[in-house]
Amino acid sequence: MPPLPSDWVTSGLIDFEYKKYVLLAYLKEVAAHFDEDKLYPLLSDLVAHFRNLDALKKQQEEAAEKFPKRLSKLDLEAMTLDFERMVQDGDCMETIRQVVDFAIPRIQAELGRGKELYDRVEAQMRIEPIGIVPVDTDDGYFFLHSEKETKTTVYRYTISLFEHGNAKYRGMRTRELSTRSLSLVQTFEAIKLDLVERFRDRPNPATWLVQTRFFWPMQETFLPVAKRSLVRHLAALTGEGPKPA
């Protein structure tokens, strides 16, 4: 199934039953990925869809408040006045409102499942330095390793700072270098020494082991969660505030 477009609520056929079918089919696919312990890119998509729906709902509510109103009911005992809008929404806008109200709690539910999986993956991770940690940790290497496997994947990383709105964030760019088989001779320390020999521009690179007790899908789960965890770890290590992007 193709990704759910960002404007799925307002584009194409504006029909509640059709939109409901599109959403439920998408959420079924999301649930299937989560069942396979695959977080990304669907977790990011869910967050974006929820934000879009929340913004659309607020826009509708703000627009409704601007409509002229007339007194519809006077309750002298309760001392309350009830008003109704003099301009009613058209069928299209009412359908969109129904779709938004239907979609928000269901996307929230899947977001909750995704967060639980994310937290479970992150809780099983350990981040340890390989060798001496240099002063500059914004450029270096990390090894992704599951205790269930005899291989480790080697990445080079670079940390960069950027601003979005009034907030500052730390982003991580990565490049996969190789996959190494571990042995009594080829240890994590030996792999680091080999990297120092190969890449002379970093004589004492920051090098980290990101290890988990379980096997997680590499591209969809292990790598993206490890990157965010390592960014937070480095920020805490240096005492810098920006959070991971």
Image (spheres, rainbow, N blue to C red):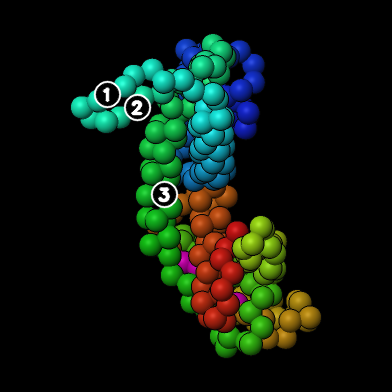
In the image, residue 160 sits, relative to residue 199, either above or below, namely above
Q: Residue furthest right?
A: 201
Question: Is label 3 in a helix, a strand or a loop?
Answer: helix
Question: In this figure, which residue is indicated by the disc labeled 3?
Answer: 115
Q: Quadrant of residue 60?
A: top right
Which stretch appears magenta?
A: 207-211
Circles 2, 1 touching at the beta carbon (< 8 Å): yes
Of circles 2 and 3, the one toward us is 2
Residue for point 46% across, 66% down: 211
**How crowded is the residue under tag 3: few (<14 C-alpha within 10 Å), some, or many (20+)?**
some
Of circles 1 and 3, the one toward us is 1
Question: In this figure, which residue is indicated by the disc labeled 2?
Answer: 81
What is the CA distance from the residue labelled 1 to the residue labelled 3?
A: 47 Å
Mark 1 vs 3, N-terminal side: 1
Question: In this figure, which residue is indicated by the disc labeled 1?
Answer: 75
In the image, residue 174 sits, relative to residue 241, either above or below, namely above
In front: 145, or 174? 174
What is the CA distance from the residue labelled 2 to the residue labelled 3?
A: 44 Å
Q: Quadrant of the C terminus?
A: bottom right
